[in-house]
Image: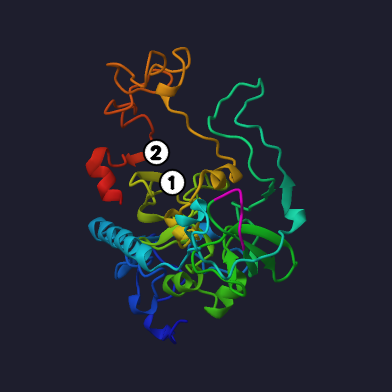
Amino acid sequence: MFKQFNLRCLTPLASGVSSRVQVPWNVSMIMSLNNTSLGGIRSMASITPTGNEEQSSVDDVNVHMLKIVPNNTDVVALEKQDELLRRRRKLAKEVTQMKKLKPVSPGLRWYRAPIYPYLHKGRPVKSLTLAKRGNGGRNHSGKITVRHRGGGHKRRLRTVDFSRFESGMQTVERIEYDPGRSAHIALIKHNDTGALSYILACDGLRAGDTIESYRKGIPPSFLKEMGGKIDPAILSVRTAQRGNCLPISMIPIGSIVHNIGITPTGPGKFCRAAGSYARILSKIPEKNKAVVRLQSGEHRYVSLEAAATMGVVSNIDHQNRSLGKAGRSRWLGIRPTVRGVAMNKCDHPHGGGRGKSKSKKLSMSPWGQLAKGYKTRRGKHQNKMKVKDRPRGKAGRKARQ
C-alpha cells in the first residue's frame, strides 16, 4: 500500500533533546485515508516529550510520550473538504446499486435497499449476544416515555466493543448486519489469543483485513524497526490506518475519525451511526484537549488521551433506503404517528371539535410546545466543552446537506 521510504531523510528523536524539537514531515510518504483523512498535515510538526529526556527504550513506551502537534491549522481548507465529501455523497446516491423489485404488490413499488454482497448471511456468534426483551417505550412504572415504540421482530443484542482496549493484531473474520443499529459490525479475531469480539465496521473494511488498537501504547516491535528511536512520520503512517483505534494525540490533524471517546478511559460516544464521521481540527497540548468537528457541524473539545477510530462508519447508503410500506416499519418496532387533529381534546391541543380543523391555534406538540419557528435550544455557553455551536436555521441545514 505504501511506497518505499528513505529513512535517512527524516530526523529521529535523539537523546538529550530540548523541550520542543522540530521534526520535518515527509508528506509525500503519507497516503490519505478516505481521500481526505490526512490532508490537514502541514510540512512541519513538533514533538512534546513527557519530561524524560533520555533515549526512549523499548520497554517503557506509551502513547503519552508522542503528541503530534502541527504548527498551524487551515480550518477553512478542512471545511471545504467536508463540503466536497457531502457533495460526493449526494452524487453517489444516483449511482449506488440499490435493490429494486418488480411491483407485484403496492408495498414493493417504492421499496429500495442498498445491496451489500459482502455481508455475512448466517447467524451471529451467540456468546457475543444477549437476549432482549422489548419494553414498548415504557419506563419502570409503565408510563410511555418514548412514543411510537413497540412490537417488531424478535432480535438479540450484539455486544459491541466501543472501548477497543485489547492490543495486538486482529483479523476481520466477517462483516455482519446488526438489527440494533444502522451501521454494520465486524467480527474480529485476535491473532495471538484467538478471542472474538464485535466492533463497529468502518467503510471499506472487509474480511481478511488486519486492524490494531494502540490505546495501551506503542508496540515494542515498532521501536525495534525504527532502531529504538521514534520517528513521528513513520509512526503516523504505520498507525493511522482505516479501522485502527488510536489516542487522539497520535492522530494527525485533518483526519476523519468515528467512535470518538470523551474521557481517557471511556468508550466511544460520538459518530457511531451509519455514514457518520468527525474531523480533527486542532490540538491544544497546554489544555490536553483537541477540537473536533462533529457531524452536526458543532466544534467540541475532547481529551487528547481519548480514543477514536480511523475512517467513516459503514453503511453510508443507509440514508438512501426506502421501506416501501408501513408494515416494514412495524417489523423494525416503529409504531404509527397519529395526527393531533385526529385525537380527542384531552390528548392533544389540536384535538376535539367538529371536523378536521385545529381552529386558529398555532402548531404545537402534544405538551403545548410551539412547533414552527419557536426556539427551544438553550444558550450557546451551557456546555463548557462546546467550542462552536452547530449551524442554526435554514442556512445551517443547507450547509450540512
- Residue placed most toward the observer, 294 or 31: 294
Q: Residue at x 65, y 22 (%)?
A: 142
Residue 230 vertical placement versus 146 (above, below): below
Q: Which residue is mark 1?
A: 302
- Residue lying at the far front of the rendered structure: 104
Asked if one can make out residue 142 in the rendered structure from this viewpoint, the answer is yes
Q: Is residue 276 left or right of residue 148?
A: left
Q: Are marks 2 and 1 in contact (CB under 8 Å)?
A: yes
Q: Residue at x 62, y 27 (%)?
A: 138
Q: Earlier in the sequence, mark 2 or mark 1?
A: 1
Question: Picture coordinates of residue 64 (x, y %)?
Answer: 51, 57
Asked if one can make out residue 305 in the rendered structure from this viewpoint, the answer is no
Question: Picture coordinates of residue 188 (x, y %)?
Answer: 66, 65
Residue 143 vertical placement versus 180 (above, below): above
- Helix, strand or loop at disc 2? loop
Label 2 CA crowd tier, 10 Å (few <14, some 14–19, many 20+): some
The boundaries of the magenta stretch are 176-181
Residue at mark 2 to residue at mark 1: CA–CA distance? 7 Å
Residue 385 vertical placement versus 346 (above, below): below
* Magenta stretch, overall SS: loop
- Residue placed most toward the observer, 326 or 263: 326
Question: Picture coordinates of residue 229 (x, y %)?
Answer: 50, 74
Q: Which residue is mark 2?
A: 385
Amino acid type of the residue that numbered disc 1 sits on in the rendered structure: Val
Question: Picture coordinates of residue 257 (x, y %)?
Answer: 44, 58
- Helix, strand or loop at disc 1? strand
